[in-house]
Image (cartoon, grey):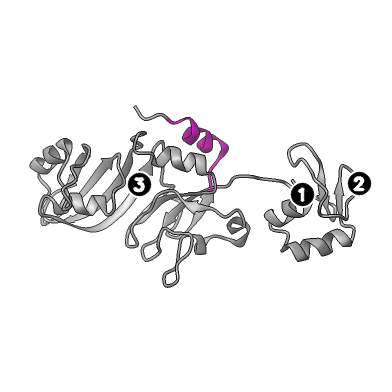
């Protein structure tokens, strides 16, 4: 990797700013001063120091966000604030993206990464990675609904969903439920309840695959996954 590209990717400035850093003689690779940005380095092997501090190279970033309502799951948008807008600049430089999407008014668990292979692995329809939601439903959710979801329901466009695991937490004029599904169709949870004549008034994703939402995170906050959590995700195979 070219040394100027390494420094730019790690947030040390634009190519022009990096060029000035090099010209000033602040960069050393394995103890040797490097002033030409075209020089190549091996970040995993070489010791790269800038102004006396080691440059730690990272290829991938893995973030867990408690997505707030009103923010869209996208990398950029002309009108609305995106989940990427909520990230610190030091994390934005990795060009991360949300894994899948949560509706604008839905909150909760959202994985953000620049690891395309892991994203594909988690979103592939063939993998059947489960996602669990908590929802408040307008109307009384019944055992009949539980059985219907277990068989799969037909959405407004004629699509018949895969089985969902519906648990009633509180029933009444409004009902609290948990729902585990293995698909991610557009507005799926809302449309599943519409198919049985009910309406979702609050929706929060609790988990994806082997990871659960960190309840210590306030809405809009995020943290890096631990090495153990990243390994769990990469090795996860739904039963």
Q: Main secondary structure of the magenta part?
A: helix
Between marks 1 and 3, how big is the CA–CA gap?
A: 41 Å
Which x, y percent locates residue 12? 73, 59
Q: Quadrant of residue 23?
A: bottom right
Which x, y percent locates residue 117? 51, 39
Residue for point 17% across, 36% down: 150
Residue under label 3, please give it: 206
Residue for point 71% across, 63% down: 14
Crowdedness of circle 2 by 10 Å Cα count: few (<14), some, many (20+)? Answer: few
Residue under label 1, please give it: 2
Give the SS element for disc 1.
loop
Between marks 2 and 1, how big is the CA–CA gap?
A: 15 Å
Looking at the image, is mark 2 or mark 1 earlier in the sequence?
Answer: 1
Q: Which residues are magenta?
A: 224-236
The N terminus, quarter of image = top right
Residue under label 2, please give it: 32
Give the SS element for disc 3.
strand
């Amino acid at each position: 990797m070219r040394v100027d590209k390494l420094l730019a990717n790690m947030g040390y400035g634009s190519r022009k700013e990096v060029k000035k850093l090099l010209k000033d003689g602040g960069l050393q690779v394995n103890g040797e001063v490097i002033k030409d940005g075209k020089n190549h380095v091996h970040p995993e092997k070489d010791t790269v120091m800038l102004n006396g501090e080691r440059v730690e190279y990272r290829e991938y970033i893995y973030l867990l966000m408690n997505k707030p309502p009103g923010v869209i799951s996208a990398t950029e948008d002309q009108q609305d604030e995106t989940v990427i807008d909520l990230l610190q600049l030091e994390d934005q430089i990795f060009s991360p993206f949300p894994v899948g999407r949560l509706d604008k008014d839905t909150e909760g668990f959202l994985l953000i990464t620049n690891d395309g292979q892991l994203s594909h692995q988690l979103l592939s329809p063939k993998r059947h990675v489960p996602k669990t939601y908590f929802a408040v439903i307008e109307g009384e959710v019944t055992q009949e609904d539980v059985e219907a979801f277990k068989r799969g329901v037909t959405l407004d466009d004629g699509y018949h969903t895969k089985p969902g695991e519906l648990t009633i937490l509180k029933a009444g004029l409004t009902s609290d439920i948990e729902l585990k599904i293995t698909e991610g169709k557009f507005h799926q949870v809302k449309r599943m309840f519409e198919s049985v004549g009910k309406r979702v008034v609050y929706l929060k994703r609790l988990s994806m695959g082997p990871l659960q939402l960190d309840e210590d995170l306030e809405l809009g906050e995020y943290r890096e996954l631990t090495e153990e959590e990243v390994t769990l995700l990469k090795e996860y195979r739904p039963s």
